């Protein structure tokens, strides 16, 4: 068995106990949590009987495995099988021979593919760098938001420097001007396999993307910082939280600004989230006067009903649901009302676990426990 190692484990176990430990358990009650909407999927508790009859009931009724038994959506099995397939095919690709045979005329070798990607990356990022000192000196008074974006620029500069340095070194190795080291060989293999090199990952944000989509994401992150430095005194109308290396610092800045504006104690504030009716950035015409608008969030395990403005059950085969723009503000802890809302954990990647950011309070008509058992979470960066 597993262990309860954090608050989310404890919450999950307590939610299971709340569902099962009730008087109805001694009667013929549904044992699959919140399975009323699932057609043909059911397992009821039998009337009090003998031990042998209980075993017979289990053997005849439980004929197949289903994620619904744990309170999960049927889509969870699709996600599990898809992940298994991706791991298998990735392993097969890694086992493929790297040498180009004489009969394969016109085929590119791993070095040729790596060299082509090297040139492409250098063309896109070779001249990119933020002048942090210039931006910082232009600000007479740096507030919490400005500090966040300057720190983001510094992280991006360090990452850009390492990317350019390592690629220039590898280019010299390809030309024969440098001996290929282990690090250069690892970089070449990563470019060939379309994987993010380990040396880059150490300086970057948590990500499970392939290199090609990671570079596109990198471009979007740089673009957001470019737009901000054009008007550094104000934050963007909508800050894409998924494009920040340290999104927690931006959420903290929201509370800091609220504390300064209202003369509140910072340690007595909590982050309050409210899903708006704005479907995209284009629908937002001004900065949030009470906090900040954030975007770039996707929900896994459920979907957001834009008509009722509440969490609802996922549609079949819909793995993720893009959330509308969310308004985030700092409020006094003693005035924040989270009753009847689902405290949805927000993670940087689908790995969840160590990539936790914060809990967003979301409105729900169903009991919050339903979404706890369904494993509903908000993901900032999707793998695909």
Image: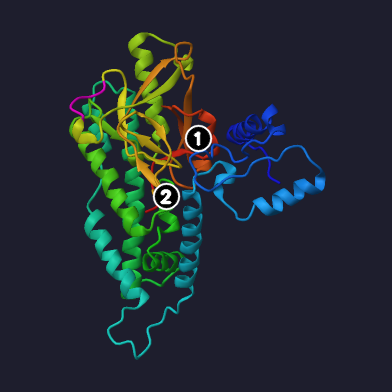
Tell me residue 53's x, y (percent).
Answer: 78, 47
The image position of residue 366, as x and y in percent, is 48, 29
The magenta segment is 284-288
Point 59% across, 41% down: residue: 32
Disc 2 residue crowd, few under 14, some 14–19, many 20+, Cα 10 Å: some
Q: Quadrant of the C terminus?
A: bottom left
Residue that label 1 marks: 371
Residue 66 falls left or right of residue 241 = right
Which residue is outermost to the bottom? 103
The answer to which of 134 and 298 lies nearer the viewer is: 298
Q: Residue 102, relative to residue 161: is it above or below?
A: below
Q: Which residue is mark 2?
A: 207
Above or below for 94 versus 232: below
- Taking the spot 52% from the left edge, 42% from the top edge, the residue there is 354
What coloring was used for the rendering?
rainbow
Q: Which mark is residue 246?
A: none
Q: Is residue 16 above or below residue 252?
A: below
Mark 1 burial class by Cα count in 10 Å: few <14, some 14-19, many 20+:
many
Would you say residue 285 sits in the magenta stretch?
Answer: yes
Residue 362 x %, y %? 42, 28
Who comes first in sequence, dot 2 or dot 1? 2
Magenta-colored segment: predominant secondary structure: loop
Query: Is 219 one of the magenta-colored residues?
Result: no
């Amino acid at each position: 068995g597993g262990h309860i190692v954090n608050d989310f484990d404890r919450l999950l176990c307590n939610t299971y106990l709340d569902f099962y430990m009730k008087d109805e358990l001694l009667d013929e009650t549904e044992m699959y949590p919140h399975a009323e909407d699932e057609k043909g999927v059911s397992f009821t508790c039998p009337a009090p009987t003998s031990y042998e009859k209980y075993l017979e009931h289990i053997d005849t009724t439980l004929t197949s495995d289903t994620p619904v038994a744990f309170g999960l959506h049927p889509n969870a099995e699709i996600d599990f099988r898809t992940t298994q397939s991706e791991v298998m095919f990735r392993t097969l690709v890694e086992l493929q021979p790297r040498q180009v045979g004489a009969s394969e005329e016109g085929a590119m070798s791993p070095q040729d593919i790596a060299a082509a990607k090297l040139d492409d990356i250098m063309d896109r990022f070779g001249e990119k760098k933020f002048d942090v000192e210039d931006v910082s000196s232009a600000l007479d008074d740096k507030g919490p938001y400005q500090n966040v974006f300057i720190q983001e620029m510094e992280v991006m500069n360090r990452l850009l420097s390492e990317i350019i340095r390592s690629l220039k070194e590898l280019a010299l190795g390809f030309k024969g001007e440098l001996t290929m080291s282990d690090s250069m060989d690892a970089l070449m293999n990563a470019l060939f396999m379309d994987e993010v090199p380990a040396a880059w990952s150490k300086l970057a944000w948590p990500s499970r993307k392939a290199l090609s989509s990671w570079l596109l994401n990198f471009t979007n992150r740089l673009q957001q910082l470019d737009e901000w430095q054009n008007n550094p005194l104000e934050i963007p109308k909508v800050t894409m939280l998924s494009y920040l290396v340290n999104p927690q610092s931006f959420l903290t800045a929201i509370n800091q600004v609220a504390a300064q504006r209202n003369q509140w104690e910072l340690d007595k504030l909590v982050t309050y989230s409210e899903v708006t009716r704005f479907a995209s950035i284009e629908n937002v015409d001004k900065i949030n006067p009470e906090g900040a608008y954030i975007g770039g969030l996707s929900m896994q395990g459920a979907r957001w009903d834009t008509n009722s403005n509440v969490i609802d059950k996922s549609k079949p085969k819909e793995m993720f649901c893009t959330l509308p723009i969310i308004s985030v503000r700092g409020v006094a802890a003693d005035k924040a009302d989270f009753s009847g809302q689902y405290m949805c954990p927000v993670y940087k990647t689908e790995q969840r676990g160590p990539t936790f950011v914060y809990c967003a309070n979301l409105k729900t008509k169903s009991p919050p426990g339903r979404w706890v058992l369904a494993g509903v979470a908000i993901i900032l960066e999707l793998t695909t």
